[in-house]
């Protein structure tokens, strides 16, 4: 401290009393920069609130179904019966994913609900999906664009802004761990959700619909066996989707 004081006196061309305030500010700053722990976050109310906000946001991010949907893009397109090959459709969505990373409306839930509506018509009604065969790729592209513009980046940005440097690493590690645990659970149970709730119910769940709302929607038509409309290729695609999911 004596050497620091002498250096400041020389740099500021000032007497000892003239650098005391600045020296004290430096000491306080260094004290804040000391390595912290998770207990430091939990003890301080303002950091505790910031921690809860970040964890809730990251869980909400993953509960939107983003990872599950992107992991299962090809089976989703096969099941939807789009005219484009499923691998080409998945590639188009991937390009949209990359482009949207650089440019945040909040329309993610509406787009996933739209995809749920498509599968509801496909699985639970006798209506033809030919006039809206473009809907799955349209919904998924704009879902991913909207996700990257808002929900995808906000939790990580907040984590970097809400915590002091001494606990920022701890908070970021906890947030990352929560993110990947939630991602694993959502992706792991995606196929079970398809079987138990139907494909439409799964996408409506990701859109933020409650179970009661989903059940109310499903009351308008009983779930039946997916129709292949007499198309043997369509029937094979449905079998592939079912086999892959199992």
Image (cartoon, rainbow, N blue to C red):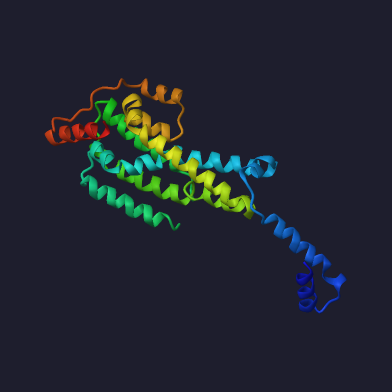
Q: Position of residue 169 (x, y in %)?
A: 57, 51
* Quarter location, residue 202: top left
Total labels drawn: 0
x then y, percent, for residue 176: 49, 46
Please state the horizontal and vertical placement of residue 75, each as a whole percent of the image.
26, 39
Q: Which residue occupies the foreground of this view, 77 or 134?
A: 77
Please report the residue visible at 86 percent of the width from the left and 72 percent of the height from the top. Answer: 16
Examine the image and state in which quarter residue 183 appears.
Answer: top left
Give the side of residue 228 with respect to residue 137, left or right. Answer: left
**Which quadrant holds the C terminus?**
top left
| In the image, farthest residue toward the front | 2
Quadrant containing the N terminus is bottom right
- Tell me which residue sits at (36%, 39%) in the image: 68
User: Closest to the observer: 16 or 110?
Assistant: 16
Viewer-proximal residue, 75 or 227?
75
Residue 67 shown left or right of residue 89 in the figure:
right
Relative to 49, 6 lies left or right: right
Above or below for 213 versus 244: above
- Give percent across and percent down for residue 101: 42, 55
């Amino acid at each position: 401290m004596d050497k620091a004081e002498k250096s400041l006196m020389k740099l500021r061309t000032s007497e000892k009393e003239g650098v005391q305030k600045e020296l004290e500010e430096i000491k306080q700053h260094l004290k804040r920069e000391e390595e912290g722990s998770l207990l430091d976050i939990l003890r301080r109310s303002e950091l505790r609130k910031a921690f809860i906000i970040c964890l809730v946001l990251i869980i909400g991010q993953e509960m939107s179904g983003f990872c599950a949907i992107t992991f299962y893009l090809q089976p989703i397109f096969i099941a939807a019966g789009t005219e484009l090959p499923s691998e080409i459709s998945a590639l188009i969505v991937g390009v949209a994913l990359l482009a949207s990373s650089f440019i945040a409306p909040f329309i993610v839930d509406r787009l996933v609900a739209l995809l749920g509506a498509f599968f509801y018509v496909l699985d639970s009604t006798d209506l033809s999906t030919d006039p809206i065969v473009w809907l799955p790729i349209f919904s998924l592209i704009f879902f991913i664009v909207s996700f990257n513009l808002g929900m995808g980046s906000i939790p990580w940005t907040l984590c970097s802004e809400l915590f002091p440097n001494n606990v920022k690493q701890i908070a970021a590690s906890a947030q990352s761990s929560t993110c990947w645990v939630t991602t694993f659970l959502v992706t792991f149970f995606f196929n079970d959700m398809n079987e138990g709730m139907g494909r439409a119910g799964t996408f409506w769940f990701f859109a933020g619909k409650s179970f009661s709302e989903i059940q109310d929607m499903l009351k308008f038509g009983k779930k039946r066996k997916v129709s292949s409309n007499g198309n043997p290729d369509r029937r094979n695609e449905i079998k592939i989707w079912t086999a892959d999911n199992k």
